[in-house]
Image (cartoon, rainbow, N blue to C red):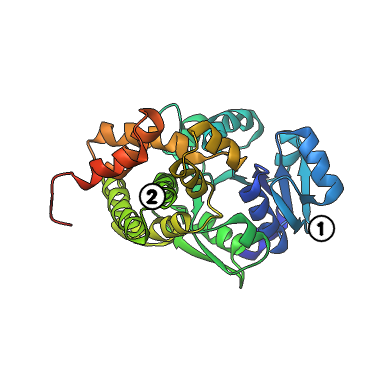
């Protein structure tokens, strides 16, 4: 279908900062784009201001971007549905859209996380509820604010349906937003979930004052943990050295635009977990991801000491200092 796909509306479910930024990108690229917010008040605010001042201040909406709080209105006439909501709400939204979608609908997830009930990949959750549809995942080192302000960005889209993948590249790719194709749905999804946990660790290390050496070690050993888990679940090793793996991990661990890093910084500086979450003001995916990845690693008997340390800090009242000591005093081993 390629260029003809741009005549068909695309629905974006989730009007947080990332969903809004992707909706703006799609509309700029000539796609009729329909953005859904679960809050009627929020939708009305955006309709009036032609922007999302709650989550992405200063980014104006293109004319071809419409906003609604009605799922029925948003999905009407759409073949492709992009889901960009916190992972804990993913299952509920899929349940909501099930009676509203036809067999021809195609699903793209840009949600980074796992199913909180099962620890499963979100695409598996969508398949269980909706049945067989073409599915894709978008993930990479992308901050919403930079994308919305048209700064150069690259991402990965994973899909195993060749026509759907070609259509998505046509919809998303432009001279400021470069799309790389993949067929590794598992690896691309896991990269987006595990990097949040490592970013909390990097933030904590900086908050405590451990320095650049410790941060770099966390990033490097973090990618080793992600790769071990990803390969065990069927992902490709090369995915974890790409944009959705190492690229997203480095971005999230080193820049204070990252909520997960800022959350870790706050805890490292002495805030309680509740205070740290309140200081962010938006969902901190790593809080849930840490528990889900902990359970996933245990289920598959995968050693993930950094992720385990963050789980212990968040759920077992271990201090960042004690967790660091535990990591540094583990048995010595070969790096590979």
Q: Residue at x 13, y 45 (%)?
A: 331
Q: Nearer the viewer, residue 330 or 108?
A: 330
Q: Residue at x 59, y 42 (%)?
A: 280
Residue, disc 1: 63
User: Looking at the rendering, which quadrant does residue 95 occupy?
Assistant: top right
| Residue topped by disc 2 | 205
Q: Position of 233 compared to 263: left or right?
A: left
Sequence-first disc among 1 and 2: 1
Judged left or right of residue 133, residue 93 is right
- Percent x, y for residue 126? 50, 35
Quadrant housing the N terminus: bottom right
Residue extending farthest to the right is 48
Secondary structure under badge 2? helix
Instruction: Answer yes or no: is residue 282 visible.
Output: no
Rendered position, 293 above or below 239: above
Residue at 36%, 40% (x, y): give it: 320
* Residue 271 image offset from top left, x and y in percent: 50, 37
Whole-number angstrom distance, CA of label 1 to CA of label 2: 44 Å
Q: Decide: few, some or many residues near mark 1? Use Cα within 10 Å; few <14, some 14-19, many ≥20.
A: few
Residue at 26% across / 48% down in the picture?
228
């Amino acid at each position: 279908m390629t260029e003809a796909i741009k005549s068909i509306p695309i629905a974006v479910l989730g009007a947080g900062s990332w969903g809004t930024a992707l909706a703006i990108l799609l509309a700029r690229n000539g796609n009729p784009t329909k953005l859904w917010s679960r809050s009627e008040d929020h939708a009305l605010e955006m309709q009036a201001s032609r922007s999302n001042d709650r989550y992405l201040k200063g980014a104006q909406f293109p004319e071809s971007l419409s906003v609604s709080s009605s799922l029925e209105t948003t999905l009407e006439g759409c073949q492709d549905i992009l889901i960009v909501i916190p992972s804990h709400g993913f299952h509920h939204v899929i349940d909501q859209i099930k009676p509203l979608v036809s067999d021809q609908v195609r699903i793209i997830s840009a949600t980074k996380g796992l199913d909180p009930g099962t620890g499963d990949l979100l695409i598996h959750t969508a398949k269980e509820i909706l049945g067989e549809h073409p599915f894709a995942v978008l993930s990479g080192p992308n901050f919403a604010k930079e994308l919305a302000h048209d700064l150069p960005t690259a991402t990965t889209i994973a899909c195993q349906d060749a026509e759907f993948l070609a259509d998505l590249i046509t919809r998303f790719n432009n001279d400021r937003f470069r799309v790389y194709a993949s067929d590794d749905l598992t690896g691309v999804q896991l990269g987006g979930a595990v990097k949040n946990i490592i970013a909390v660790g990097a933030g904590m290390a900086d908050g405590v004052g451990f320095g650049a050496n410790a941060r770099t070690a966390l990033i490097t050993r973090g990618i080793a943990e992600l790769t071990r888990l990803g390969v065990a679940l069927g992902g490709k090793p090369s995915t974890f050295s790409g944009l959705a793996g190492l690229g997203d991990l480095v971005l999230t661990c080193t820049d204070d635009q990252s909520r997960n890093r800022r959350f870790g910084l706050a805890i490292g500086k002495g805030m309680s977990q509740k205070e740290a979450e309140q200081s962010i003001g938006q969902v901190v995916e790593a809080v849930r991801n840490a528990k889900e990845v902990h359970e996933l690693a245990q289920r598959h008997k995968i050693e993930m000491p950094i992720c385990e340390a963050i789980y212990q800090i968040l759920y077992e009242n271990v201090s960042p200092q004690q967790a660091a000591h535990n990591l540094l005093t583990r048995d010595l081993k070969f790096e590979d």
